[in-house]
Amino acid sequence: MAKDRKPRRPRAETPKGFRDYFGAEVTERTAMLAQIAEVYHRYGFDPLESSGVETVEALGKFLPDVDRPNEGVFAWQDDDAGWVALRYDLTAPLARVAAQYRNDLPSPYRRYAMGPVWRNEKPGPGRFRQFYQCDADTVGAPSVAADAEICAMLSDTLEAVGIPRGDYLVRVNNRKVLNGVMEVAGVLDPADPDRFADERGIVLRAIDKLDRLGPAGVRALLGAGREDQSGDFTKGAGLADEQADVVMGFMEAKRDSGAATVARLRELVGDSKTGTEGVDELETIADLLAAQGYGPDRVEIDPSVVRGLGYYTGPVFEAELTFEITDEKGRPRQFGSVAGGGRYDDLVKRFTGQAVPATGVSIGVDRLLAALRAKGRTSGETQGPVIVTVMDRNRMADYQAMAGELRQAGIRAEVYLGNPKNFGNQLKYADKRASPVAVIQGEDEAARGVVQIKDLVLGAKIAENASLEEWKSQPAQREIPRADLVTEIRAMLDREEG
Amino acid sequence: MAKDRKPRRPRAETPKGFRDYFGAEVTERTAMLAQIAEVYHRYGFDPLESSGVETVEALGKFLPDVDRPNEGVFAWQDDDAGWVALRYDLTAPLARVAAQYRNDLPSPYRRYAMGPVWRNEKPGPGRFRQFYQCDADTVGAPSVAADAEICAMLSDTLEAVGIPRGDYLVRVNNRKVLNGVMEVAGVLDPADPDRFADERGIVLRAIDKLDRLGPAGVRALLGAGREDQSGDFTKGAGLADEQADVVMGFMEAKRDSGAATVARLRELVGDSKTGTEGVDELETIADLLAAQGYGPDRVEIDPSVVRGLGYYTGPVFEAELTFEITDEKGRPRQFGSVAGGGRYDDLVKRFTGQAVPATGVSIGVDRLLAALRAKGRTSGETQGPVIVTVMDRNRMADYQAMAGELRQAGIRAEVYLGNPKNFGNQLKYADKRASPVAVIQGEDEAARGVVQIKDLVLGAKIAENASLEEWKSQPAQREIPRADLVTEIRAMLDREEG
């Protein structure tokens, strides 16, 4: 006998590694991005919104932070467009746009972009495969004045969203200085730049992990390699001790003043032409910023900043929040990096064959939002609506008219639209919505031209402390003329905010 | 001999069917969505942002507007999440969220969502495979008061973004009335609801095409079928003449007043229980809206509205802009539909097995933006920045300080960061940026503590009409003390705006 199989119901689940954002999570991000966009706009940057989908060939092999290129993207084959993929950042689409519209765009082209990007990584706790980025870049500006501008703008942006001066630092370095140091250490041959490329990649990623691994861990990765606590072994760059010493010296070259750091770096790069050029650029950036009032309380030269991305060719920068938070294990630690960027002069060249100088910054939107929450700058909560309860379902038009009047006055308000039979459910709903006020009008009140208004915030306070008798006397609820609905509720809400 | 082949450069192209949005295209959409969100918020709706990627099984076979389900989405197989796809609308993710979080969300759950959706359709002129939607839905509200609320909110929303009353109409109908008419016509058997389902699908899509095909075209599709101008034949529902007459009567049932239309619909649905229920609901919605002041100048009952989607189960609505525009062939025509929605009581049931009543509306973001442009409500242009030109590249710090001062005063400003050698290029750049003012300071001016400010708006006006002599006298350019930079430019910009 054939079995009568019911079709299985679909699972109501987000795909692994993806998540949903509700209420204040959405509005606070939107508000923060609007503040950032205002600063970018004032600096002359124009918005660009490219689509989530790009051709795989346009995206190229520049996926940051992964050792194996070509992995890490969501890609599929399309009948009309060939192999396409979801963008993994906002820089690769900019390079494509800069090449595609090169005859129409102003040059230099300052643009900002905000939106989701996707990474095909193993999902893990707190690691999501879709997240927001917020970038600003200048394409076609060879001068480091463009890099200085980005650093100033980043500083202004952090203050605009609510990170006070003193709670952040924009740290600046230059890849050319690092390359100069590599020359001195013997892992970069200017006559044969491809030689030792693998070793240099390992050195770069090792320095980038200084925060997490400490100097000893980095040192191990410069040499033979490093075994972590779980026993996993990471192969090192294989540098000899003297070579590793040079690199470590670079990383620790920061001095008390920018001038002293620059002097120390000059020593370290020795005769290297590239290295000297990099030190000169760092000095220029610091001078330009100082002349505009961006001193060491906001921007500083820090040789330990290298940024993991392979494509940077000159100045690199990072915004670090310097206030302390308590980590998940209860230990105090600095909040850390929320934005980073640098100069990448070769990305557009992939398309056109001509080098186009470019520099930019990317803000980690979720990190910065978390910082604002840690500083109490955003509440994580939204004011709930006034709830007009339904005592008599035949008088729905009256209830909707009440909510309508409140909204006309700019007050967030709604009518309870669930099954109105159980009044307790209506108050539970109001509680779940964090509603400040409930409006109640039964047959009797309607006949007398009055409504009851119930202060739910005050009610909750009383409920915490009051006896049953006190509770029953309901001091948080009172009767008002129907005609005074808007003014009375307005006054109640003002009291609560005040 | 082996040929030395250079790797081909990647093409700098958006994938077919996708596009980029620049400048005002982005900011105007952002501004419009913010205005819409404010109305939705005031009505008690909370934002929800789900990810672009959903499991294929969660999305289901509800893709609207395509005859063949399961087509039309971008889907791929993921190692961790199985078959996944880009969302094709914002309703399917809502149904998934409502089921997934059913124990945590308030009920009813009012939510709004804004963001891109993707359709895997053949790219064509003006047809894009990624576009924005902006939805508001109420899940868990069985009463048609929820549908009335959506209609009122849609009306408020259109006025909030800048469509004046009189230039739009929210038209309301009810699928139950149509089903009642189908019963009368003999293409719906309440005892065997699956019978004639294909025929009813063809009827639905035919009525939905009334605007485009006219009554004769719809009539042909109700019968044997219709051959279009290109000779393509579309199979019809195969209704007999008397049956088709009943359906045509429904579609043309609109009378001068809502009450008269309701009376006509009551005649048409005869004894059908479903049909009578639908007419009652329509009457209730009209009464609720009228009581709140949403009369026939804003909302009307219109039996020709059916909406193409298969999943609607009760009230359906559509916002139409009634002002005329000139189409691409120079003929005047009504702007047409910018939003639509309805009640769908079965979408959440797919996941949970329990029916959850829901109703909502989706705004066509690009259509509404186009309407605002047609009405001159948005300019399509952004105020360009003040350009500080570079006469002496060694004095970059001074130029950046000028731009910094202007920005501190809230004025959009930037330093020219291209190669400063050719001054003409700097002015061409300012022109391309639609810059209102250029600031010029050479060695001489710097020594004397002055700057030249050049009114580019006035300059352009003079250039149109002036002789070479007049042009050379440069009345649009004047010298001011460096210390007065901000006040003078502020005054110049105010004059231009005023």
Image (cartoon, coloured by chain):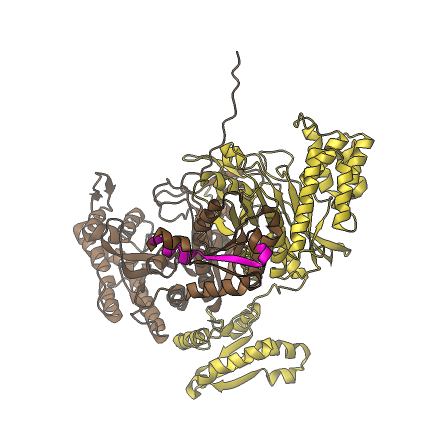
Chain colours: A yellow, B brown
Please tell me which residue lies in front, B145 or A10. B145
- Check the picture and name the quadrant holding the C terminus of chain A: bottom right
Kindly indicate the quadrant of the structure image that contains residue A290.
bottom right
Q: How many marks?
A: 0
On the rendered structure, is A372 left or right of B352? right
Furthest-bottom residue in view?
A: A448
Position in image of residue B132 (x %, y %)? 43, 52
Kindly indicate the quadrant of the structure image that contains residue A280.
top right
Asked whether residue B388 is drawn in magenta, I would say no
Kindly indicate the quadrant of the structure image that contains residue B145.
bottom left
- Magenta residues: mostly which secondary structure? helix
Furthest-left residue in view?
A: B241
What residue is at 40 percent from the left and 65 percent from the top? B157
Magenta region, residue range? B446-464
Residue A180 visible to an observer of this rendering: yes
Residue B104 visible to an observer of this rendering: no
Position in image of residue A382 (x %, y %)? 56, 66
On the rendered structure, is B5 left or right of A461? left
Q: Is residue B140 above or below residue A60?
A: below
Position in image of residue B338 (x %, y %)? 35, 57
